[in-house]
Image: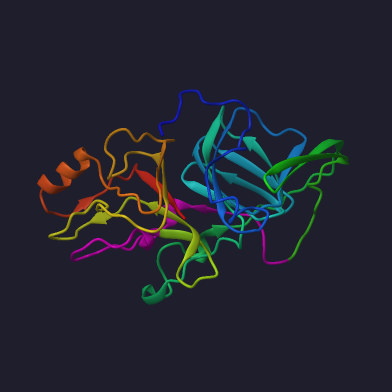
Amino acid sequence: MTPAEDDFSGLTADFASCEANPEQLSAATKDGYAIHWYTATKDMVDSCLTNADGELLIVPQQGGLLVLTEFGKLCVRPGEIVVVPRGARFSVQLLDEAARGYVLEVFSGFFKLPDLGPIGANGLANARDFEAPVAWYENRQCDFTLLTKFEGRIFEATQDHSPFDVVAWHGNLAPYKYDLARFCPMNAVSFDHPDPSIFTVLTCPSATPGVAIADFVIFPPRWAVAEHTFRPPYFHRNVMSEFMGLIRGQYDAKAEGFAPGGSSLHSCMSAHGPDVTSHKAATAGPEEPAHLPRDTLAFMFET
């Protein structure tokens, strides 16, 4: 799906592009996920949103966001992500004229770092690089609108003051942001093509060991050095559904027709792979170390 030009009409993030079977996996049963797009041209003024259905992972693609929460505030720009836990009240102000991006919502559990296994203590996304909100509060009397998302519906209430009047808190659950440029990728250094899960930033595990409700995976700038190997993502089918998005640049498996802000969906067991242009370039090009462009950043919601 290619993004429409000037596709901005206020703050909207109220529809899912793909969602798990609502009869089996839904917000009501606290199981499954949904994927959304958002577009915005206006700040949320004297209003906030609480998502009782699940945790939100927000991926800005165009325009920065100032996310105000009960815990403080977070400045998030394209190339960064922000995670808002279930139940946290938040409001969004725009840092640019307009904003656009993607949202992954999980109804069960919460996002965590993947188990690193043989990688050891260091690699991929390191815990030290995640940032908590900057301390902030406001003591302001006003007509304030509280929006609550519950079982896919939006409920509205009003009060006579800002809810962002919390001056201190303690605990181990809060909104956080992460700069994707700090991700330390692992890759093949001799031959073959690792599974894309090697690029997992955050995962939401299911009750079945080794199976995730959703993984957030990125394809960052990196060296490709594997010999006797087709280096782009190979042609395959798999049990996971793959929602692809592009933050900037050009994805190495889709040289044409996949613009920043666009998306593609490969459903469970649907065959997919590189386009013709990418395939020809990878099979005819010289087999020498190559660095994927530093201005490229693609991602995948694998569910």
Q: Nearer the viewer, residue 241 or 170?
A: 241
Assess whether residue 146 is covered by the magenta stretch.
Answer: no
What's the magenta region?
Answer: 171-199
Q: Is residue 219 left or right of residue 72?
A: left
Q: In x, y percent, where is residue 225?
A: 19, 58
Magenta stretch, main secondary structure class: loop
Residue at 42% across, 71% down: 116
- The residue furthest top is 6
Q: In x, y percent, where is residue 38?
A: 56, 36
Residue at 31% across, 55% down: 237
Q: Is residue 113 above or below residue 40?
A: below
Q: Is residue 285 visible?
A: no
Q: Is residue 127 left or right of residue 217?
A: right
Q: Is residue 182 left or right of residue 145?
A: left
Q: Nearer the viewer, residue 303 or 247?
A: 303
Q: Is residue 183 visible?
A: yes
- Quadrant (top left/top right/bottom left/bottom right) for the N terminus: top left
Assess whether residue 180 is covered by the magenta stretch.
Answer: yes
Q: How many marks?
A: 0
Q: In x, y percent, where is residue 273?
A: 27, 48
Q: Is residue 17 above or below residue 229?
A: above
Residue at 43% across, 74% down: 121
Residue at 82% across, 37% down: 144
Q: In x, y percent, where is residue 78?
A: 48, 41
